[in-house]
Amino acid sequence: KNVHLGSVDEIPLPGVTVDNWDSIYNFQAQEDDVVIATYPKAGTTWMQEIVDLVLLEGDVERNMRAPCFIKVPFLDLVPPKPMPQGVELADKMESPRRIKTHLPTQLVPPSIWGGNVKIVYVARNAKDCLVSYYYFHKMNKGLPDPGTWENFFSSFLSGDIPWGSWFDHVIGWWKAVDKHRILYVFYEDMIEVRWGV
């Protein structure tokens, strides 16, 4: 894999994200946006589908209107052309928009913090997040090669992987709950509710 990492304010991010940082950081949120925020591999796609179904009042047919990356644009990742950037997709969407991000709180566009934007944050325990992220890195050509398990584990602990430190990420979002409209959800609780435990 020939994928480079860059950084914004010392947070490692995919190079394509850094290259397009101005458009991401200057994204204009709308009052009725719903933002799904997670550290990578913490249940993002699952929560995207839940939020979409809630906003569609459970209409499964309408939920299947488009692939997940179209109906819930990924704000901070820029896919290869001809696929549109998350900001471009969001700008063309009707309200209420659903938007996902892996950004830590200190990098979230200011417009998301203002107004009436609703945020759902999903936290997953570090061990499961780490294992899932390692295997995701191995198969995803858009992320750097993870190297050995030992190397990736060390990088995870030090925060030297895309989107930075898991520890700082979950703590940053936890602290933001007191200041913003954030529903902080634990992945493990989602599993218990799903299975009726």
Image (tube, helix red, strand yellow):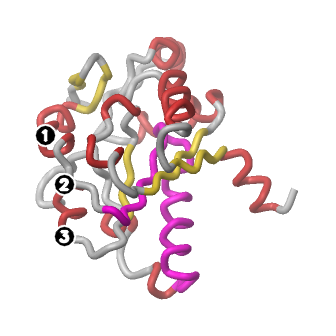
User: If you read the primary sequence from the N terminus, does the residue marked by circle 1 or circle 2 appear first?
Assistant: 1
Q: Measuring from the top left, give residue 148's x and y in whole percent.
A: 47, 18
Tell whether 33 sits left or right of 88: right
The local crowd at label 2, few if under 14, some if 14 to 19, many if 20 or more residues have their Cα within 10 Å, is many
Helix, strand or loop status at disc 1 = loop
Q: Residue at x 37, y 46 (%)?
A: 101
State which quadrant residue 92 falls in: bottom left
Residue type, mark 3 in image:
Lys
Residue type, mark 1 in image:
Asn
Task: Report the residue marked by disc 2.
Answer: 85
Task: Report the residue marked by disc 3.
Answer: 92
User: If you read the primary sequence from the N terminus, does the residue marked by circle 1 or circle 3 appear first?
Assistant: 1
Helix, strand or loop status at disc 2 = loop
Q: Measuring from the top left, give residue 7's x and y in whole percent.
A: 24, 22
Q: In this rendering, is residue 34 above or below 63?
A: above
Q: In this rendering, is residue 115 above or below 134?
A: below
Q: In this rendering, is residue 92 above or below 161?
A: below
Looking at the image, how many numbered discs can be counted on the residues?
A: 3
Magenta region, residue range: 31-60
Using the image, tell me which numbered label, if any, was put on residue 20: 1
State which quadrant residue 18 falls in: top left
Q: For this rendering, which residue is in front, 7 or 82?
A: 7
Q: For this rendering, which residue is in front, 63 or 139?
A: 63
The local crowd at label 3, few if under 14, some if 14 to 19, many if 20 or more residues have their Cα within 10 Å, is few
